[in-house]
Image: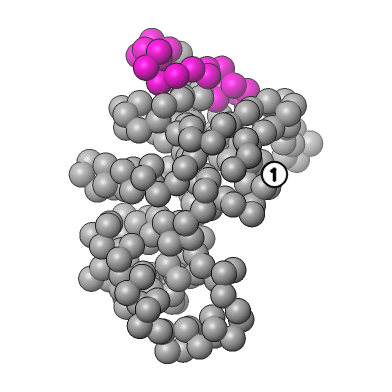
Amino acid sequence: MSPLILNQAYADFGGTRVLGPISLHVQPGEHIALVGRSGAGKTTLLSLLYDRRRSDITFIPQTLGLVDTLSVFHNVYMGQLATHSGAYNLINLIRPFRTQIRAVTAVLEQLDMASTLWSRVGELSGGQRQRVAVARSLFQDADVLLADEPVSALDGPRSEAVMQALIKQNTTTIIAMHDLDLARRYANRLIGIQDGTIALDAPSRAVNTHDLDALY
């Protein structure tokens, strides 16, 4: 896997600069937490990174991107739509193959969600929906994960389980997080975004509470 690179990238919205210019180099094997107050530019940065190279990236947006009228199975299965033919996907939509049911169930078991396999996503709680989006990303099995607050609706033990699964599954992760303690435990590099620019970029072990407080 090649590095993920942004050189002097920026984003405008309604004629106003909301991010950048930003330069960022992400090496394979890095686990990065994006931190900073709401509206600082973390979501925009993730979108820029995703637009740069989608072929080996899975993305969990804050909106989750789920189809409420479909089952948990079908939403998770969508993570591998691109790896199968249209005919195979259509058949699997109507009458799922046992091999795919087993594969999706195995992913859901990691997140304590196997019992919801045939539930409609629109009937689930916010935390359950978040775990379905995580399961879909795990099922996609990409090299790089981008995620925007993937554990914001989860309690302590469940957020820990999700973070462990994401770090284990993906070679490289870039995750926007509001839980600073969780960020420091699961990331080996912290990037602080402030007013659309990178105000902090350091190994997690070298960042202290004062450094983080200055971002908020």
Report the side of 206 relative to 53 (left or right). left
- 158 shown above or below 119: above
Quarter of the image where the C terminus is located: top left
Q: Name the residue at 64% across, 27% down.
A: 24
Quadrant for residue 156, please give it. Answer: top left
Q: Amino acid at mark 1?
A: Arg
Quadrant for residue 71, please give it. Answer: bottom left
- Residue occupied by mark 1: 52
Classify 10 Å Cα crowding around label 1: few (below 14), some (14-19), many (20 and above).
few
View extreme (front): residue: 1
Q: Which residues are magenta?
A: 193-212
Q: Name the residue at 42% across, 56% down.
A: 138
Residue 59 colored magenta?
Answer: no
Residue 202 colored magenta?
Answer: yes
x, y percent for residue 147: 48, 45
Kindly tell me whether residue 44 is visible in this rendering. Answer: no
- 191 shown above or below 14: above
- 74 shown above or below 3: below
Kindly tell me whether residue 2 is visible in this rendering. Answer: yes
x, y percent for residue 79: 49, 64
* Numbered disc total: 1
Determine whether the residue tagged by mark 1 lies in a helix, strand or loop: helix
Q: Name the residue at 31% across, 43% down.
A: 164
- Closer to the camera in the image, 128 or 56: 56
